[in-house]
Amino acid sequence: MEINWKENMNEIGGAFMLTWAVGYSGLGVEWAVCLAVAWMAFAGAHLLPVVTWCHMLTGDLSDVEGNWMTNGMRLVAQVIGACLAIVLATEAGDIETGWAATDMWIPDIADNLWVVLGMIAAGAVWWQIHTRCDMVWASAFAMMAFAAAMTLNGASEMGASITSAGDGIVDTAVNWICDGLFVGIGALIGVKIHELLPEAGAAEEAAAE
């Protein structure tokens, strides 16, 4: 597999900027503005794990190298960028942040069913906005609007765990994967629904016949 260093450096730089400047809360206009600027500055970068999972699951699922491995490298690059930002912001651990790992939620998925359905719905709607609008501003502000339904801080959580000597790394890694996976599943469902719907012109012609 040939590694695209420019692509991965964009991910590292963009994730560093987001983590250091505004974090991954997804709340507030300043966050959406920073995300839009980062997308423009680091052209082609996904920056957020949920975005990478959307690309991954709506891409060619049979393409191991071009889809799964390439996007997997993006996810790793995002974590590296977050780690660098956390090391800088905490002065290599001298500043105590009070961070604690979040418990793994997937074993209790039955109790979190509505949350999971919300993630899937948010992924479906956001991906349609992202792929139909040519402006990064629309995608960024839509991401802000759906922040309550999507977990956007996967990279920074992984970065915090790694820079804390692996504290809670198993729970954090599983959450990092699942939080992006369900949003990506939503994006895939949205694409499939769109493909099943007839075009407006075709529907009118069928009705006329």
Image (cartoon, rainbow, N blue to C red):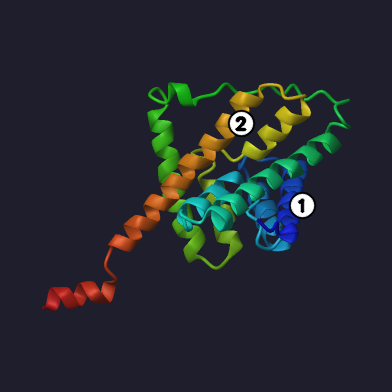
Q: Is residue 7 above or below residue 148?
A: below
Look at label 1 and name its amino acid: Gly
Mark 2: secondary structure: helix
Task: Identify residue for label 1.
Answer: 13
In percent of the image, x 61 and y 31: which residue is there? 173
Residue 160 position, x and y percent, is 73, 30
In which quadrant of the rendered image does the N terminus lie?
bottom right
Q: State how many labels appear.
A: 2
Residue 161 position, x and y percent, is 71, 28
Task: Identify residue for label 2.
Answer: 173
Mark 2 and mark 1: Cα distance apart in space? 21 Å
Look at label 2 and name its amino acid: Ala
In percent of the image, x 55 and y 60: which residue is there? 138
Q: Quick one: label 2 or label 1, which is nearer the N terminus?
A: 1
Residue 137 position, x and y percent, is 60, 60
Residue situated in front as seen by the camera: 99 or 56: 56
